[in-house]
Image: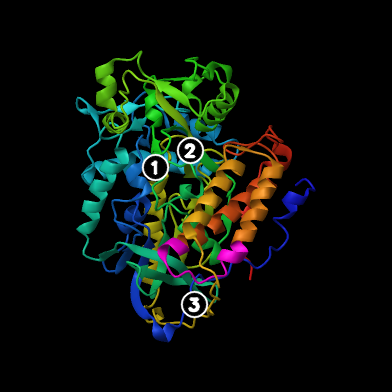
Amino acid sequence: MPDRFPSSMLSQPWPQIVSRYLVPIEPKRCGHFFTDVLIIGGGLAGLRAAHEIDPSLQTMILTKDKLEESNSVYAQGGIASVWDPEDRFDNHVQDTLVAGGDLCDPTVVDMVVREAPERVAELIQWGTRFDQNGDQLALGREGGHSHQRIIHALGDATGKEIMRAMIAHTRRRSNIEISEETFTIDLLTHEDRCQGAIASIRGGKPILIWAKETILCTGGCGQVFRESTNPRVATGDGHAIAFRAGAVMRDMEFMQFHPTVLYIAGSSRTLITEAVRGDGAHLVDASGYRFMGEYDSRLELAPRDVVSKAIVNQMEKTQAPCVYLTMKHLDATKVRNRFPGIAKVCEGFGLDIAVDPIPVRPGAHYMIGGCTVDENAATSLPGLWAAGEVTSTGLHGANRLASNSLLEGLVYGAIAGRNVSQAALNRNSTELRVLPINSPAKGASSQPIDLADIRNAVRALMWRNVGVQRREDRLLEAFHAIQQYCRYVLAQDLNSTDGWELQNILTVSLQMACAATARSESRGVHFRTDFPKMDNVHWRKHLELRREN
């Protein structure tokens, strides 16, 4: 590793600004619940894990909002899987490795790709209605893929349909209890083992949930950035609670920015799925010039990191706040039928997607980094397992190939569920008991904290300084500013969902800014204008972060 000050941040202890628990805990004054298996997160990875748990084991699923509100529900494009007879597993593997910036784990990639058809077949068996051409599944193509292999539903609402079927299937399981609107504040640990979690139901007093085994499936952290495709619930809670509990975090510099997010000033951001470009849409700048040919021979079908950087560069060239997607050269009826969800959203702004240019710009979309898991979905913390976007598995490397995310959640959800089920069956029921937990009270601020103001300031800072394009001086500025916020905000007992979310956003932002400053090269979604080239000699490696006592 080059001998530079930013890199040294990884080997030197930080000031003690991230405390172990967000809230004081007095076990004698808390409510206690006991379960064999605790699953934190009700997205696709969490529900898929639940279906592998032995029916004799009591399983509890905690979800921050309603089950229908997760990143999985908002997934538009589809699931990547070899299905066409002309396609091969090796093709999908190679596409994933190429997109991943020479940082994927080839063994993991091969395993996930080969399990894909079986996982998709399960979804169909459990009631998912994918789009079809006659009696065959309809297959689309997206950026970075060499073949038609994107299986989708409802045109552009794949996640919504998959989750509809999965939620219905899950509710039929008598051993599974679902606790909605339950905020997981922290993981419980005792003698370096995860023992469950601290949670608050509908904003109530924190309770302690003791579990033999715990699976973390909390999704992503797009809300760390001002511009994001993620729903408001995606505040990086899992990334923060795993870090506080002492789990090893990896690849926290790698946030994927989706190149095409609907940009209407003053409105919420909406994803414009990769499949729009896969079906032939062109990217043009403010003057109507189709610019992707200047950046990549694959044009609009280049991987997301390439397209995002091209859009940012073109916006700078033209001094415009966005670029545009146009489909006016395609069949209008087919366009409206293929993308009904996007058509409806755009119609609300007076745009006809078959005729009018759609204003777009990049936005934070998918977090590649997270808690490190092995081939069994086990984290570095005994008793804690994980699946989905909260993890770093090695599948995505430095850049996720389109539509590999739902696939990863399915495959690793199944793996986590199987291994957790066996581990819980092997543990004696007498091990479920109240354990001594030490969490002293925090101080209270003498002045009220404007949570919304700080949240907006941090998200804007992250977008400006740790966004699509990065350089050392701005990264260091972000890192030190976030440290200052952390010293003030993390020291408080904020005792509300908004407060805990802000503390989690700060904890995740600190990790991101540190890792992005340290990696002095460009690789995949991590683009440094001061180090624009990939450096395999020094940086073909992963960066790990861990909170030390």
At 40% from the left edge and 82% from the top edge, which residue is drawn? 433
Residue in the foreground of this view, choosing between 252 and 432: 252
Q: Tell me the residue that label 3 is attached to.
A: 24
Judge whether residue 491 is colored magenta: yes
Relative to 193, say whether 314 is above or below: above
Residue nearest the observer in this picture, 479 or 126: 479
Q: Disc 1 residue type?
A: Leu
431 to 308, vertically: above or below? below
Mark 2: give few (<14), some (14-19) or many (20+) Cα within 10 Å.
Answer: many
Can residue 543 be seen here? The reply is no
Identify which residue, 536 or 199, lies in the foreground. Answer: 199
Picture disc at residue 363: 2
Look at the numbered disc 2 and give the secondary structure of its residue: strand
Q: At label 3, which amino acid type do we have?
A: Pro
> What's the coloring here?
rainbow
Q: Is residue 499 visible?
A: yes
